[in-house]
Image: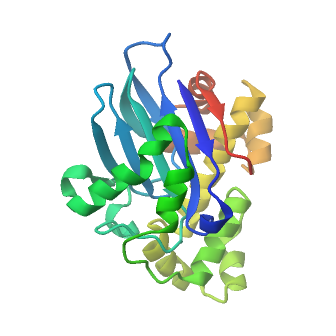
Amino acid sequence: MIYEEYAPSAAIRRDVEAFWRFRLEDHEPERLRHVIPPDGAINLCLDRHADGALTVAIAGPSDTAHVVDVTRGTVSVGARLRPGGGLRAPGAAPPAIAGRGLPEALMEPGLVRWIKTALVGLVEGEATAADAALAAWPFERAAEDRAVAAVADRIMAEHGRVRIDEAAAEAGLSERSLRRRFGVAVGLSPKTFARVRRLRRACVLSLEAGARLAPVSAEAGYADQAHLSREALESFGAPPAAVAAYLRQIRHAFAAG
């Protein structure tokens, strides 16, 4: 399998964290189960199947890995919306779809059509049309909670290595107020979101460090390797060595930055 990310243009970076695409390669099995690390974000998703049919879904923010069946010939693409940003698809408020998402059958027909049109260019690795479509977001935007967005941005920039009490104080909020407002805007608590982003960072580092989990756990900000192991088990249902071994089977090409 190959997994690729594309950076959005500067014009939409306040709304979109990344575009992505993955597919099985020709030498791989006809079908396999793919484990997707959590990212704590809402993702607009599109699959183009081997027969040309298009299906869509919205993945909600989650703190656990998502398992999908992947078939050779199908290309899966998507847009990872910036947590805490203003883009809100109809019927997809973060708290309402956290941990479960929104299938095509429950979407408004206009939203389904728009996602197909907006994202289909990503199937061929072309992000220009998707970038333009997101820039011209046709649905109502939510009023951005700037304090929450600033905390979410800091958590992402520091890969989860943030003290939530300090982040709340810097935002001029109590921890309780931050937790409530963060849940509305992001769909997860700030502590859970930080845990997800730290684990995501550990996954990326494990691609570079091979089987050496001690330096991974230290650089990702875990108290020790046992701490990393507990969080990997909670999110993936597997120890970090098994997660790292699986991820290293995938060819990754990440967006710069």
Q: Nearer the viewer, residue 220 or 112?
A: 112
Q: Residue at x 42, y 32 (%)?
A: 75
Q: Residue 228 in the image: x percent, y percent?
A: 65, 42
The answer to which quarter of the image holds residue 206 is top right
The answer to which quarter of the image holds residue 164 is bottom right
In the image, is residue 178 above or below residue 202? Answer: below
Residue 93 at least partly seen: yes
Residue 212 at least partly seen: no
Q: Name the outermost residue toward the bottom.
A: 172
Q: Nearer the viewer, residue 51 or 182?
A: 51
Q: Residue 239 in the image: x percent, y percent?
A: 56, 31
Q: Is residue 54 left or right of residue 98?
A: left
Q: Residue at x 54, y 57 (%)?
A: 131
Q: Nearer the viewer, residue 119 or 169?
A: 119
In the image, is residue 94 above or below residue 117? Answer: below
Q: Residue 66 in the image: x percent, y percent?
A: 42, 41
Q: Residue at x 44, y 69 (%)?
A: 137
Q: How many marks?
A: 0
